[in-house]
């Protein structure tokens, strides 16, 4: 059962919903209901309080939370950018709040989610391995617009993306390093445990083709596992999967967190384990899935010294960015030419809400938060970022790259976002297809795992280095100020495609 971000923020109380959301990792009961708003605001306020008490009060007292959360999450990003210590303190406080507020419920017993592993596993999952039947792909090949880019063609396209402001130079450098070191692709000596193995943006397919060993974790759904199994057989590596009652594959970390932890102890045999979060759910369930993953990650990091983490950051979020990115966007705004004249009447009529310049004076925050995605989505992604910051600060391997805006199913089912993506090219933003994004982001994962973890840089550079934001960061306009215009221009395309 999935609750979309457009539905009410208090999870409905039907019998079916109670059965679906009252077991496993869930929001706590507040006044008789599991309010995502109360808990989400509490976590964000707790994160802000140690460095910016006034921001914490604003979060707690904000009216019309679904509209105000965008500005407040942006403010939290700005607070994280002030000093190295501020970023770490916010991350620690936010994770501590989440682990004490979210709960794990089973058989009418409830504990804080951080205590979930005190609950004995209800069943023991068996293990199945599927070995690929193909020869490993031993060079980096990137599908792009009907071609497979490799060698000089790939290098040329990387340079074109950098020139057009679609990706950061550090991203192009990293991908090219992987192309120069094809021996990295198989990730010898490592296992990559993917939570959300069937996700469109997940690295299962490219890693399997390259000969890596993947531990696949996803919901127990027959069609999903048929697809995962076909990918495994068509690859060149090994895919290890959990088997539940009756021998059916699948493991839901939200409802079966203790079982997932016990099974991973058996399945993860390599000295170095990489735990990756690629699962997505609608509404509050995305927060529940992220909380479950975070508890799992925290325990594995503590118990297994060779554990690293992998995530993808969404481009539709707020990030602290380098000064050259800000300067590029401001220059683009100042050099609009005739467009300045054409846009002036709309700017005036909207009181500056349309065609607003990116980066207000003194700002280093690329603000691409999209209100339609909802506060639960923003909180889930923030929890992931906080875990990345804390883990990197402790000298552990973390791969956490901003992925380009991509035509995934979760986007196309939201008509506003789908239309905006269709019209994004009018504003200097390139939208990628899933097959291109998957390979590029898997290549970034491979790159990151072959680097020495660093504690010396500002924590927020974990996200700005190697970013493939599609052009959102370097565009002339604040993204929300042209979202409606992009959607309007892209509407005919979505209508033609049936979106």
Image: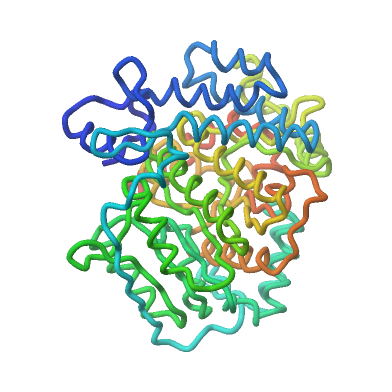
Residue 216 placement (x, y as % from top left):
40, 65
x and y, in percent, of residue 482 in the image: 59, 32
Q: Is residue 8 visible?
A: no
User: Is 63 in front, or is 92?
Assistant: 92
Residue at 61% from the left image edge and 34% from the top image edge: 479
Direction from residue 355 to residue 376 in the image, left or right: left
Q: Is residue 496 above or below residue 60?
A: below
- Image quarter hosting the C terminus: top left
The answer to whether 219 appears left or right of 467 in the picture is left
Q: Position of residue 250 (x, y in %)?
A: 30, 60
Location of residue 327 (image quadrant): top right
Q: Residue at x 38, y 27 (%)?
A: 28
Q: Residue at x 39, y 87 (%)?
A: 133
| Above or below: residue 301 compared with residue 112 | below
Quadrant of the snapshot with the N terminus:
top left
**381 or 190, nearer to the observer:** 190
Apparent side of residue 459 relative to residue 110 in the rendered image (left or right): right
Image-quadrant location for residue 52: top right
Image color mode = rainbow
Q: Residue at x 68, y 33 (%)?
A: 477
What is the number of callouts on the image?
A: 0
* Residue 18 in sight: yes
Quarter-wise, where is residue 81 in the image? Answer: top right
Of 148 and 305, nearer the camera is 305
Please say if 449 is above or below 168: below
Q: Where is residue 104 drawn, in percent x and y?
A: 36, 38
Q: Report the front residue among 272 and 148.
A: 272
């Amino acid at each position: 059962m999935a609750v979309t971000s457009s539905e009410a923020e208090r999870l409905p109380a039907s019998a079916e919903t109670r059965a679906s959301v009252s077991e496993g990792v869930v929001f706590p009961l507040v006044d008789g209901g599991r309010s995502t708003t109360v808990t989400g605001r509490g976590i964000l306020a707790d994160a802000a309080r140690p460095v910016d008490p006034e921001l914490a009060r604003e979060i707690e007292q904000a009216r019309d939370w679904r509209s105000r959360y965008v500005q407040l999450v942006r403010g939290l990003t700005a607070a994280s950018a002030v000093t190295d210590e501020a970023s770490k303190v916010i991350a620690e406080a936010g994770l501590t709040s989440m682990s004490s507020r979210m709960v794990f419920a089973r058989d009418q017993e409830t504990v804080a989610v951080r205590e979930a592993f005190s609950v004995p596993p209800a069943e023991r999952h068996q293990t199945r391995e599927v070995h690929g039947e193909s020869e490993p792909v031993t060079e980096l090949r990137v599908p792009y617009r009907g071609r497979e880019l490799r060698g000089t063609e790939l290098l040329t396209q990387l340079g074109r993306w950098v020139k057009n402001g679609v990706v950061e130079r550090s991203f192009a450098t990293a991908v090219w390093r992987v192309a120069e070191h094809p021996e990295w692709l198989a990730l010898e000596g490592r296992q990559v445990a993917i939570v959300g193995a069937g996700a469109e943006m997940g690295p299962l397919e490219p890693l399997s083709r390259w000969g890596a060993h993947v531990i696949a974790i996803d919901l127990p759904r027959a069609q999903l596992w048929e697809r995962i199994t076909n990918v495994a057989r068509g690859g060149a590596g090994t895919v290890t999967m959990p088997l539940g009652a009756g021998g059916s594959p699948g493991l839901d970390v939200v409802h079966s967190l203790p079982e997932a932890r016990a099974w991973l102890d058996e399945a993860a045999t390599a000295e170095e384990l990489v735990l990756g979060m690629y699962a997505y759910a609608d509404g509050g369930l995305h927060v529940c899935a992220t909380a479950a993953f975070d508890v799992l990650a925290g325990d594995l990091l503590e118990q297994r010294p060779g554990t690293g983490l992998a995530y993808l950051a969404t481009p539709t979020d707020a990030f602290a960015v380098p000064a050259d990115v800000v300067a590029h966007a401001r220059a683009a705004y100042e050099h609009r030419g005739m467009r300045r004249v054409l846009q002036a009447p709309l700017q005036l009529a909207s009181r500056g809400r349309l065609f607003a310049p990116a980066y207000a004076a003194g700002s280093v925050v690329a603000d691409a938060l999209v209100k339609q995605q909802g506060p639960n989505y923003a909180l889930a992604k923030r929890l992931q970022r906080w875990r990345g910051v804390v883990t990197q600060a402790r000298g552990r391997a973390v791969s956490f790259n901003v992925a380009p805006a991509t035509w995934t199913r979760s986007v196309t089912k939201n008509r506003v976002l789908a239309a905006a993506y269709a019209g994004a090219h009018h504003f200097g933003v390139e939208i990628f297809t899933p097959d291109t994004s998957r390979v590029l982001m898997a290549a970034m994962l491979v790159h990151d795992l072959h680097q020495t973890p660093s504690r010396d840089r500002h924590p927020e550079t974990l996200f700005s280095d190697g970013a493939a934001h599609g052009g959102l960061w370097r565009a002339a306009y604040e993204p929300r100020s042209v979202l409606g215009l992009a959607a309007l221009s892209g509407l005919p395309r979505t209508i033609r495609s049936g979106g």
